[in-house]
Image: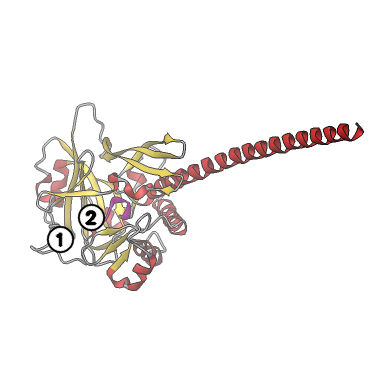
Amino acid sequence: METIIFEKIVKKNKRRQFIKTVGASILAIFVLLIIGYKGLNELTKTHGEDIKDRYLLLSEIAYPNIDYSNWHFNVTSQFAGVFESHRYKNIDGIEVPFEPYQGYYSLGGNLDNNNDSEYLLEGDNGQSSYTHGSHYKVPRFYNINFNYNEDSYNQLTQDITYVSDLNGEAVEVAITFDKPYTYDEIKTMIPDNLMINWYWIGTTSDLDTVNFQPKDLFGMTDYQQIYKESKEVPFEEIYNSFIKYLKSGLYNQWISGNYSRENDSLEETEGNSNFTEEKMNTDKNNYFDVKEDVQNFISNNPDSKTAKFSGVILTGRSENFEALKNKEWIYASNIGQTVEIRPYHHLTK
C-alpha cells in the first residue's frame, strides 16, 4: 500500500517538474523571440540610418545645386522601408522642384544603388541629360582631359551663346573652365549680377564626366550667395567645413563610385554581385574610383586662398548671361533648369 502511494507521489512530482520544464522552455523561447525580433528591428533601423547619414553628408559635398527641404522614413514592412527626401534647386533665389530622393533599405542591408533618381538619361543628340522620373534637365560638367569629338556620343556644348535669348526666364548653367581657378579669380570672372551657386572640384581622370552620377560630382555650395540675407560667412569657414565633410565621406566609405574606362559606364561597388574587389584589383587601369578625385583635391588644396575649382553652377536672369559670351576661359557651358520669372518672384541678383 505504501509502495503504491509512493509511486503516485513520484509520478505527481515528475508531472509537476515536466510542466515546470515545459513552461520555462516556452518562456525562454518567447523571451528569445522578443529579443530576436527587437534585434532584427534594430538591424533594419541601422541600415535605414546608414542611408540617411550618407545622403545628408553627400548633400553637403555633391549633388550640384541640389538641396533638400525635408526627409523622412516610410516603413513599408516590418523589416523594410524607404528613406525619402524632397529636393529642389535654387535658381537665383527661386526654388524649383527637383527629383525626390529614395533610398531603399531592408533587414539584409541597404539597396541605395537601385535608386533611379541617381541615374540620368541622355537626350537631344548627346547634348543634354535628364532625370528619370520627371525629366528635369540637369546641367553638365565636361572633362578637359577627355577627347570630345564628332564620334563622341556626348557632345561638347556652348549653351551660353543662346541663354540670353530666353527672355523673362531665370536660368541655371554649368560652366566648365579651361583650367582650374581660385575662388578670388572666379569672383572677378563672373559678373556681379549672376549668382554662383556651386563650385565643382573637377576630376583627375580622363573619363567623360557627363556620365558621372550627381552623387559622384563633388563640389562646394556658396552659402554667401544663397543665404545672402543672413549673417555673412567667411569663405575660409565655408571651405574648411567643406574639407571636413569630404574627409568624413572618405572615412565612412560613403564616397564610392567606380567607372569603367572601357565605356565610361558606372559599376557600383555596393550590392553588385558582378563587381568584386578581386575584379577591381585584376585590372585597376580599367576602372576609376571617384574617391581619387576627393583624395587628390584634399591633398592639392590645403588652403582656401589657393584652392582651385574646375567649374561653377551659375544662375540668374537670362539677359545677364550676355556678358559671358565668347569668354576664352569657358571650356563648355550647359544649361540646366529654367523658370519663368513671375511678378511674385524675388530674385537674389
* Residue corresponding to mark 1: 328
Q: Position of residue 199 (x, y in %)?
A: 30, 53
The N terminus lies in quadrant? top right
Q: Nearer the viewer, mark 2 or mark 1?
A: 1
The earlier-in-sequence mark between 2 and 1 is 2
Residue 213 lies in the magenta-colored region: yes
In the depicted structure, whether residue 136 falls above or below residue 275: above
* Residue at disc 2, secondary structure: helix
In the depicted structure, whether residue 155 falls above or below residue 1: below
In the depicted structure, whether residue 66 falls above or below residue 255: above
Packing grade of label 2 (10 A; few <14, some 14-19, many >=20) is few
Instruction: Give the farthest residue toward the right.
Output: 2
Image quadrant where residue 154 sits: bottom left
Q: Position of residue 190 (x, y in %)?
A: 23, 51
Residue drawn 16% across and 57% down? Answer: 332
Majority SS type along the magenta span: helix
